[in-house]
Amino acid sequence: GVLGHSLKRGPFPLDHHIDGIRYPRPHFATGDSEAPVMMAAKEAAIKRVGGSNVIYGGAGNKILGAALGEVAASIQHKVGGPWDLCAPQAILYAMGGTMTDLFGQPIEPQLYLADGLKQRCNERGYVATPPGSGEHFHTAPVNVLLD
């Protein structure tokens, strides 16, 4: 963006689902995975606060959706590696959002250092929520995984 102007982007997945009938709000962005941990996280979020799941492609796109407030939360059970999270996490944090792994633990800066890379860190996934969302949306998918 240009200095002094808000960040925005062109067509995004909700352009097709914005009617609020077939996909009621709040929206939770995920991929199309049917892995048990993803199904449990999606179901927990919707059961706790209502709403619906919308499919976003790419980890960065999901996190940007949260940063811009397009969705109540972005949930992903695993990522390709630190390169999938580094830039979008910085944007999310700069805009006041929150991101943890699926177990509620902060995603540590060491994740991005080649010599400090934790083994299998990409398998802990993430939950990203927009600025001002508070704990309400962030903890629903995290809590079900901890139970």
Image (tube, rainbow, N blue to C red):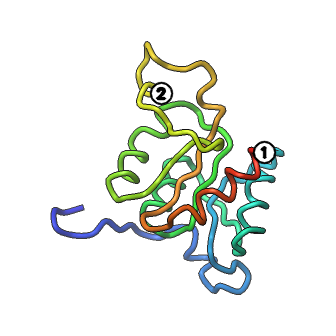
Q: Residue furthest top?
A: 115
Q: Secondary structure at mark 2?
A: helix
Q: Position of residue 7 (x, y in %)?
A: 31, 65
Q: Could you tell which of marks 1 and 2 lies nearer the N-terminus? A: 1
Check the image and report above or below for 20 versus 58. below
Horizontal placement of 77 versus 83: left or right?
right
Identified at 53% across, 53% down, the residue is 128
Name the element at disc 1.
helix
Dot 1: few (<14), some (14–19), or many (≥20) neighbours within 10 Å? Answer: some
The percent position of residue 83, horizontal first and vertical second, equals 46, 33
Residue type for callout 1: Val
Residue 95 quadrant: bottom left
The structure residue drawn at horizontal position 67% and vertical position 50%, both measured from the top left corner, is 142
Q: Residues within 10 Å of mark 2 (few under 14, many from 20)?
A: some
- Mark 2 = which residue? 111
Seen from the viewer's position, the closer of residues 135 and 113 is: 135
Going by the numbered disc 2, the residue's amino acid type is Leu
